[in-house]
Amino acid sequence: MIFGYALLFVALLISSVAAFYSIMGLTAIFAAAFWPIVIMGTVLEFGKIISTVWLHKYWDRVAVQFKLYLVPAIVILMLITSMGIFGFLSKAHLDQAVPAGDISSQVQIFDDKIKTERDNIEAARKALKQMDAQVDEKLSRTTDDRGAERAVQIRRNQSKERTTLQNEISTAQKKISSLQEQRAPIASQARKVEAEVGPIKYIAALIYGDNPDANLLEKAVRWVIILIVLVFDPLALVLILAADQTFEWHRPRKKLPYELDAKQTGWKQTWQPISEDPWHDEPKYEPDDGPLTDKQIETIKQASGVDQTSTKDKKSNPLLNGANGMSADDWIDIKTETPTIINRELETVKATAENLKKKFVTWIEKFKKKN
């Protein structure tokens, strides 16, 4: 019985959490009517639970019209609850994903700026290499002093441009350092957010393979939410029904010998005996031990005062004075034999009742076997 109460507690707890998530999800969908949605969702949740338990408990007695409406209504209410839970969990995911997206965008902006500066540095270094290559080429083509002087002249002509390129490289490096310093705290926040959403990445990688993109991550989130929804509200209702069934099993109950199957509730309503075991009640009269003996007859005569009846009484009593063709002796014989006759009739009634009882019990046993 303790397990039944524990089962009921867990069922109500799951149902309460499901109702809370559902109501919060519905308020997110219909944000303009917060309190009306809360009231409506609460009432519908209670109605769903009560309707489910009532149908389960009285399914055999409920009319078809009730079943045709209540069963689809309960299914629709479960879908509404599941939709609310889906909305609540989706909103929670979006509340987590939006900041992560913003932080990722900021990090991406810094990464693009750093990449641009690095490209500028690479371009300036490439230009310097080309200048150096031009001077080296001039030197490699000549072996006299005039060729060397021309190479020096070319380098002198490049000095201004070289200085500009070197300044650009230095400025770009300073910008990169500054951008990296600005990027560091934002990247740290991004890593924290990524750690929070990391499990869903592993789930997506398990389903869709390594390195899933953003679309695959969103699909994985939706499937996780759907799986949660499928076992949330239905599990709560099934556990409530299981708790009710557990209480039914543990409720003390004495079964009568003629009681039919539990589905035959109409029989139990139309005929319930007063005693718990009608076939074994003790008789309300003393059992008959055979015909009366002469001594018992004599005792009855003395107790009834037959022998002491006066002549006057016999004349005044038409049954004793021979009226209607009956003499006083006949009347005495009737009074004497009446108990025996009654006992015989009672024995006949008892035998008939026993036969009827046996036939009835046999019929009940056959009926149970068939059903």
Image: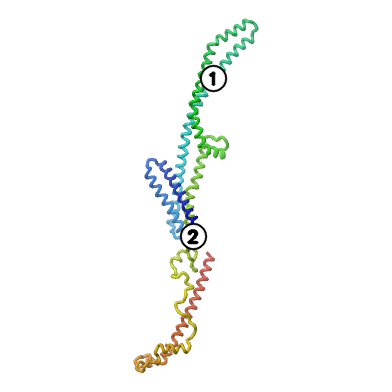
Residue under circle 2?
Answer: 250
Colour mode?
Answer: rainbow
Q: Amino acid at mark 1?
A: Ile
In the figure, is residue 63 to the left or right of 163?
A: left
- Residue 26, percent from left and from top: 42, 43
User: Observer-nearest residue: 266 or 148?
Assistant: 148
Q: Residues within 10 Å of mark 2 (few under 14, many from 20)?
A: few
Q: Residue at x 48, y 36 (%)?
A: 97
Could you say whether the residue bearing mark 2 is in a helix, strand or loop? Answer: helix
Query: Mark 1 vs mark 2: which is more N-terminal?
Result: 1
Viewer-side label of 1, 2 = 2
Q: Residues within 10 Å of mark 1 (few under 14, many from 20)?
A: many
- Residue 350, percent from left and from top: 48, 78
Q: Are marks 1 and 2 in contact (CB under 8 Å)?
A: no
Which numbered disc covers residue 121? 1
- Residue 295, percent from left and from top: 47, 89
Looking at the image, can residue 69 be seen? no
Which numbered disc covers residue 190? none
Residue sitting at the far front: 2
Q: Residue at x 56, y 15 (%)?
A: 128
- Residue 134, percent from left and from top: 59, 12
Number of numbered discs overlaid on the protein picture: 2
Looking at the image, can residue 123 be seen? yes
Q: Which image quarter: residue 31?
A: top left
Q: Amino acid at mark 2?
A: His
Could you say whether the residue bearing mark 1 is in a helix, strand or loop? Answer: helix
Q: Which image quarter: residue 318?
A: bottom left
**Is residue 209 depicted above or below 305 in this figure?**
above
**Is residue 121 depicted above or below 279 in this figure?**
above
